[in-house]
Image (cartoon, grey):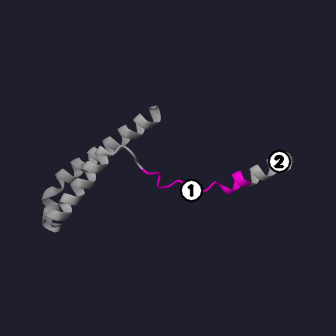
Amino acid sequence: MNNFLAALLLCSVSLSLLALLLRVLRPFLKKRFAAKWLYYAWLFLVLGLLLPVRPALFELPVAHPSAFFQAQRNASGSAGP
């Protein structure tokens, strides 16, 4: 539970800082981007603050090869280093 609350706090703080940065840079961004793209940026921020779930983008969906070899050694009965 503590991990969830820490992750939620980290996401909230980081997105709040990003919202503050977007608000400060608005006069410069308004000249370069259409209102539609600024709207999408704010929509992204609001959705990020509303949804507490973050996908793990950098975790591999498969086991590390060393875990496979360790399981193979344990199955064969030989003690490895």
Q: Residue at x 22, y 47 (%)?
A: 20
Question: x and y percent of residue 53 in the render?
Answer: 39, 46
Badges 1 and 2: C-beta atoms under 8 Å apart?
no
Distance of mark 1 from mark 2, alpha carbons?
26 Å
What type is the residue that disc 1 sits on? Pro
Q: Which residue is drawn at 47% across and 55% down?
A: 57
Instruction: Say whether disc 1 or disc 2 marks the residue closer to the N-terminus.
Output: 1
Q: In the image, 76: left or right of 59?
A: right
Q: Which of 37 and 76 is in front in this view?
A: 76
* Mark number displayed over residue 80: 2
Indicate yes or no whether the magenta region holds residue 80: no
Taking the view exactly as shown, the residue that stands out farthest to the right is 78
Magenta span main SS: loop
Taking the view exactly as shown, the residue that stands out farthest to the top is 2
- Element on which disc 2 rests: loop
Compared to residue 39, the image places residue 71 above or below, namely above
Q: How crowded is mark 2: few (under 14 residues within 10 Å), some or many (20 or more)?
A: few
Question: x and y percent of residue 31 in the render?
Answer: 13, 66
* Mark number displayed over residue 61: 1
Q: In the image, 40: left or right of 75?
A: left
Q: Residue at x 28, y 50 (%)?
A: 47
Compared to residue 71, the image places residue 8 above or below, namely above
Which stretch is magenta? 55-68
- Element on which disc 1 rests: loop
Question: x and y percent of residue 32 in the render?
Answer: 17, 67
What type is the residue that disc 2 sits on? Gly
Indicate yes or no whether the magenta region holds residue 58: yes
Q: In the image, 71: left or right of 77?
A: left
Q: Which of 20 and 70 is in front in this view?
A: 70
Q: Which of 17 and 53 is in front in this view?
A: 53
Q: Residue at x 29, y 44 (%)?
A: 50
* Residue 12 location, quadrant: top left
